[in-house]
């Protein structure tokens, strides 16, 4: 069975940048956009051009420098938004306008105070208008996660007829369960006339911690684009994390789905985004957290030292991390101490290790972590009792 490509649509600079305190200036956005292009993302959502002159300018500048990726600008289903986005994207090699409107009853009746039919008309008008500027038009059905499937299928059918090339099915509130989100994608694949002319896209928020699982369920059920951000940043609890979906597809080759991402740049890209946004990555974050390849309990350390794959399903080098870390704490065993001692120049016999280990435990109980300098100190103390020669 041949492998299908899943397009990676990065929205770090749009949905990600909406996070309070994460605002970037144009220079910072350019640095990140260049890196995303190098990383191999297929689409960069560069901003929401009508939202501010600064964002408009960023989309213009990003359009000039991006070499490979499609550059996309967000709009509401509003004429002026679409005109401004088209203007901002004029210098992009591959421009895309991302336009759309809320389709759930909650959006239709409470936000827009209108009818389902009127929403379809507005959606079609917006897509047709966007199409008069660019060939590549993505339509988002905001709150699709809570939109009735039959109505959503009608919306999709009409916007495909109007020229939409990509259909974004956002779980805007992060409410869906993976099975439910996957079923929605499958329903659209099977019930929307003309669906073969468009790509279905997953845009999942993480309010219940399910964004990654939902996106994967979406592609298993026929979607071929995932909208995501570096480090999973985004509104509220964030968006789908790019590094997670990319590595899930890579580590599960039997799904026959892969991406164009150069995974060895994932760790450094995560650091770059975190530093520019001033948004710390939690240490236990999958793939890119500081502890993602760190082992601290004696049982795990012994296993990893003997054979890395005992406790690691990803080779750290595949994501740009130099090596697994064997962290010395009061929970570490002799194998880890011998391993780390050897790394800093001490080859210990069994008797020496026994004595050094006793000294190490006294040290480790006082400290959170025993570092290289502490190992030298411990060795000196053992030398002073004539029990070991450094
Ligand atoms: O979460 C969402 O629905 C969005 C749309 C604007 C695409 O970000
Ligand atoms: Zn979103």
Image: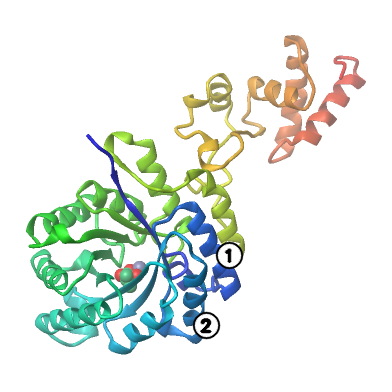
Ligand 2 rendered quadrant: bottom left
The picture quadrant where one finds residue 22 is bottom right
Name the residue that disc number 1 marks: 31
Look at the numbered disc 1 and give the secondary structure of its residue: helix
Q: How is the image coloured?
A: rainbow
- Residue at the spot 57% in from the left edge and 22% down from the top edge: 302
Labels 1 and 2: the sequence-earlier one: 1
Q: Name the disc covering residue 54, or none.
A: 2
Q: Position of residue 204 (x, y in %)?
A: 32, 60
Look at the numbered disc 2 and give the secondary structure of its residue: helix
- Residue at the spot 53% in from the left edge and 27% down from the top edge: 300
Give the vertical position of 166 relative to 339 (above or below): below
Q: Name the disc covering residue 347, or none.
A: none
Give the vertical position of 228 relative to 114 (above or below): above
The picture quadrant where one finds residue 72 is bottom left
Q: Nearer the viewer, residue 127 or 175?
A: 127
Q: Residues within 10 Å of mark 2 (few under 14, many from 20)?
A: some
- Residue at the spot 77% in from the left edge and 27% down from the top edge: 344
What is the CA distance from the residue labelled 1 to the residue labelled 2?
A: 16 Å
Q: Position of residue 45 (x, y in %)?
A: 41, 68
Q: Nearer the viewer, residue 311 or 215?
A: 215
Q: Quick check: 300 left or right of 381? A: left
The picture quadrant where one finds residue 184 is bottom left
Q: Position of residue 24 (x, y in %)?
A: 56, 73
Q: Position of residue 154 (x, y in %)?
A: 9, 70
Q: Quick check: 3 left or right of 33? A: left
């Amino acid at each position: 069975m041949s492998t299908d490509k899943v397009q990676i649509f990065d929205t770090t600079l749009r949905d990600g940048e909406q996070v309070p305190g994460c605002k970037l200036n144009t220079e910072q956005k350019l640095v990140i956009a260049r890196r995303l292009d190098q990383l191999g993302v297929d689409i960069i959502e560069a901003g929401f051009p009508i939202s501010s002159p600064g964002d408009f300018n960023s989309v213009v500048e990003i359009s000039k420098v991006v070499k490979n990726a499609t550059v996309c600008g967000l709009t509401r289903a509003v004429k002026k938004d679409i005109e401004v986005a088209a203007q901002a994207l004029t210098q992009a090699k591959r421009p895309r306008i991302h336009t759309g409107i809320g389709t759930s009853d909650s959006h239709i009746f409470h936000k827009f105070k209108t009818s389902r039919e009127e929403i379809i008309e507005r959606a079609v008008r917006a897509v047709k208008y966007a199409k008069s500027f660019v060939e590549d038009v993505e339509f988002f059905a905001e709150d699709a996660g809570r939109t009735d499937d039959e109505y959503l299928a009608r919306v999709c059918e009409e916007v495909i007829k109007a020229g939409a090339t990509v259909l974004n099915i956002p779980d805007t509130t992060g409410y869906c369960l993976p099975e439910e989100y996957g079923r929605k994608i499958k329903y659209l694949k099977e019930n929307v006339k003309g669906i073969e002319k468009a790509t279905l896209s997953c845009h999942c928020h993480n309010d219940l911690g399910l964004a990654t699982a939902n996106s994967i369920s979406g592609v298993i059920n026929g979607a071929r684009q995932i909208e995501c951000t570096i480090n999973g940043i985004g509104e509220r609890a964030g968006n789908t994390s790019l590094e997670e979906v990319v590595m899930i597809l890579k580590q599960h080759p039997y799904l026959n789905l892969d991406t164009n991402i150069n995974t060895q740049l994932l760790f450094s890209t995560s650091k770059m985004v975190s530093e520019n946004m001033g948004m710390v990555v939690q240490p236990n974050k999958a793939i890119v957290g500081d502890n993602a390849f760190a082992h601290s309990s004696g049982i795990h350390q012994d296993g990893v030292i003997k054979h890395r794959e005992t406790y690691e399903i990803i080779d750290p080098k595949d994501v740009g991390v130099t090596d697994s870390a064997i962290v010395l704490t009061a929970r570490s065993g002799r194998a880890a101490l011998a391993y780390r001692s050897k790394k800093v120049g001490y080859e210990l016999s069994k008797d020496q290790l026994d004595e050094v280990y006793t000294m190490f435990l006294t040290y480790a109980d006082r400290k959170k972590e025993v570092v290289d300098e502490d190992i030298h100190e411990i060795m000196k103390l053992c030398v002073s009792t004539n029990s070991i020669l450094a």
